[in-house]
């Protein structure tokens, strides 16, 4: 069985995603979060680093878990109770964890928005959604009815999206910023799109979409952010000739 050193894979991830050039949210901790003892022979990719995904990755025989949402969003001390169980599970499984948040959202080919844009077959795709000094999403052109776009999203994401029908019945300039960008739809509207696709947003965004004349699709935070880790795992698998698998543990949100 072929193995590659963890350090080699981490260097390649950092080279591709350039986390040092980003300002991220507190707790993101981009990069290697947990190391292991042996080399890497199987990569698992998941949206979230949780006890459930760690168990599933270990069951698949993985020794590296690539995630979009890492382990350190809130206090992780003391190492008791659920925190202790998680750490013990990682050590017993000899599973390393590499996490990448905004740099994976923003990547022009490997990113979440880039992957969803490809799946929807947008044309003339370019950077979109300036936040924290970087474009975190992608926008492109697709002349399509609003109803048909909703059907396409259901096929791509696996569940019907929630529509805030603030705009017209047809769509042309479509912007994508995955995850929880609904509360920032003014940013999307200011960049000239007529349709905005993201994961989720609060209740008050319904009236805001109407005020802005913007069609908004909420496709689910989890569902819209499966693309990046899959693309990164695929790139690493091709580069190092080791297998990868996706750990699907949807939140339904």
Image (cartoon, helix red, strand yellow):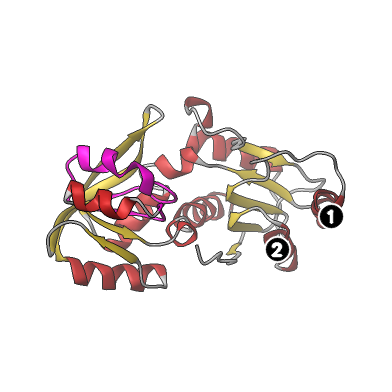
Q: In this view, does 98 lie to the left or right of 160?
A: right
Q: Closest to the observer: 122 or 173?
A: 173
Circle 1 — which element? helix
Circle 2 — which element? helix
In which image quadrant can residue 43 be found?
bottom right
- How would you rate the neighbour count of disc 1 (Cα within 10 Å): few for under 14, some for 14-19, many for 20 or more? few
Task: Give how far across and how far down residue 102 sits, in percent.
Answer: 47, 39
Task: Give how far across and how far down residue 112 sits, in percent.
Answer: 42, 51
In which image quadrant can residue 52 be found?
bottom right
Query: Residue 159 got which mark?
Result: none
Residue appearing at x 17%, y 42% in the figure = 192
Query: Residue 85 got which mark?
Result: 1
Q: In this view, does 105 lie to the left or right of 55?
A: left
Q: Are marks 2 and 1 in contact (CB under 8 Å)?
A: no
Distance from Cα at disc 2 to Cα at disc 1: 11 Å
Disc nearer the start of the sequence (2/1): 2
What residue range appears in magenta? 175-202
Look at mark 2 in the image and give the residue it sits on.
Answer: 52
Residue appearing at x 26%, y 48% in the figure = 208
- How would you rate the neighbour count of disc 2 (Cα within 10 Å): few for under 14, some for 14-19, many for 20 or more? few
Residue appearing at x 62%, y 36% in the figure = 27
The question of residue 130 being in magenta is answered with: no
Task: Give how far across and how far down residue 51 sits, in percent.
Answer: 73, 58
Task: Give how far across and how far down residue 140 sits, in percent.
Answer: 21, 50
Q: How many marks?
A: 2
Residue appearing at x 32%, y 67% in the figure = 153
- Quadrant containing the N terminus is bottom right
The question of residue 182 being in magenta is answered with: yes
Q: In this view, does 246 lie to the left or right of 153?
A: right
Q: Closest to the observer: 176 or 3?
A: 176
């Amino acid at each position: 069985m072929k193995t590659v050193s963890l350090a080699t894979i981490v260097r390649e991830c950092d080279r591709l995603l350039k986390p040092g050039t980003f300002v991220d949210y507190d707790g993101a901790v981009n990069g290697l979060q947990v190391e292991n003892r042996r080399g890497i022979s199987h990569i698992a990719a998941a949206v979230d680093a949780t006890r459930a995904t760690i168990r599933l990755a270990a069951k698949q025989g993985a020794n590296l878990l690539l995630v979009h949402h890492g382990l350190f969003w809130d206090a992780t001390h003391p190492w008791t109770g659920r925190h202790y169980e998680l750490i013990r599970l990682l050590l017993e499984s000899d599973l390393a964890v590499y996490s990448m948040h905004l740099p994976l959202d923003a990547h022009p080919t490997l990113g979440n928005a880039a992957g969803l844009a490809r799946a929807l077959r947008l044309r003339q795709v370019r950077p979109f959604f300036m936040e924290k000094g970087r474009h975190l999403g992608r926008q492109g052109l697709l002349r399509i009815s609003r109803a048909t776009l909703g059907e396409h999203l259901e096929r791509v994401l696996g569940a019907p999206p929630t529509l805030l029908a603030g705009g017209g019945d047809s769509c042309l300039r479509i912007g994508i910023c995955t995850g929880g960008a609904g509360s920032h739809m003014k940013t999307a509207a200011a960049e000239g799109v007529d349709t905005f696709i993201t994961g989720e947003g609060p209740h008050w965004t319904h009236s805001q979409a109407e005020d802005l004349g913007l069609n908004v699709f909420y496709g689910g935070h989890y569902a819209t952010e499966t693309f990046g880790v899959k693309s990164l795992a695929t790139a690493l698998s091709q580069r190092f000739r080791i297998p990868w698998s996706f750990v699907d543990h949807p939140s339904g949100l």
